[in-house]
Amino acid sequence: MTYREAGVDIDAGNAVVERIKPLVKRSFRPEVMGGLGGFGALFDLSNKYREPVLVSGTDGVGTKLKLAQQLGRHDTIGIDLVGMCVNDVLVQGAEPLFFLDYFATGKLDVDTTVAVVGGIAKGCEMAGCALIGGETAEMPDMYPPGEYDLAGFTVGAVEKSKLLDGSKVRAGDVLIGIASSGPHSNGYSLIRRIFDRAGRPADIDVGGVKLIDALMAPTALYVKPILELLGRHDGAEDGISAMAHITGGGLTENIIRVIPDGLGLDIEASAIVLPPVFDWLQREGAVANEEMWRTFNCGVGFVLVVAGADVASVGADLDRLGLAHRPIGSVVAARGDERVHIG
């Protein structure tokens, strides 16, 4: 972690470093070389891969940050940041190796910074991804008091022969949806409008939890179970042909990104059973189904595209790994310009 931005409170920066060092070091992997504080972070993958393809990803957490700041909930937003990045590189079969963060604020608050970066470190540890560096910038002319911004960057690797690029996808493949933990980090501009119009009813019950807890639930980290699943189906003639992370654009715009030209998707509307928090959002905001499917994950955070003959074995492994799942549709021949049909 570095604290070199002009005008930074060095004492506060040093206090943050000392408090987060043990949290960050827990995320380290054997491939990490050196420690914290250098100008560049080092990672050695020479003993792990024969033909490594590096897969990189970067993201933020959108306006969920605004809600976190309004509520003073800073300890899990870092998990969201990690999830948005590592779940993306996972889609191509890559194991996230290391992560870097960028934290920018008007005035460095030690407790807030430690909570945020501590959440990032926890997310990395949960994903098996080393937090090996980052930058904290204090810019009083850019951010009003109490506000901060976050960005994350991750690099993963996959053997070239095991890269999932969609080329194995065939008509008849089945879409298996894996449950999300909530809205994750997408749709929060709409969520905040609905929440505000409803009078911010933070404590109402939605499915046995408080609404605000459901809205702030951190993004599910699919890395470890999905990598184990891929390992069990390694070398299969068919097996898992593609994967999708359901982020901005929801169900209608994300799965199709991994489907080759000439093919489309039939998604069964009856299979999209809204969890309580999404049901509340739809009812309270009078949101049409089409807008829900385009804006939110609607309870499906990750999707596997699986050859029909392997659906049962993949499903059994998902059960063993503790990932709630259900078939939500199939791959079909494209019908003109309409490549995604939900009905």
Image: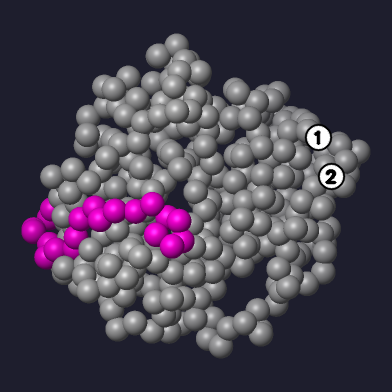
User: Dividing the image into 4 quarters, which one contains the C terminus?
Assistant: top left
Residue at the outermost right position: 11
Nearest the viewer among 116 and 314 is 314
Asked where in the image residue 250 lies, by quadrant, the reply is top left
* Element assignment for label 2: helix
| Above or below, comparing residue 68 to residue 26 in the picture | above
| Residue wearing tag 2 | 19
Q: Position of residue 11 (x, y in %)?
A: 91, 38
Specify how the rendered protein is coloured: one colour
Q: Position of residue 220 (x, y in %)?
A: 49, 48
Q: CA distance from mark 1 to mark 2?
A: 9 Å
Q: Are marks 1 and 2 in contact (CB under 8 Å)?
A: yes
In front: label 1 or label 2: 2
**Image mark for residue 110:** 1
Q: Is residue 252 visible in this depiction of the protein?
A: yes
Where are the magenta residues, as a range? 319-338
Residue 34 higher or lower than 282, as above or below: below
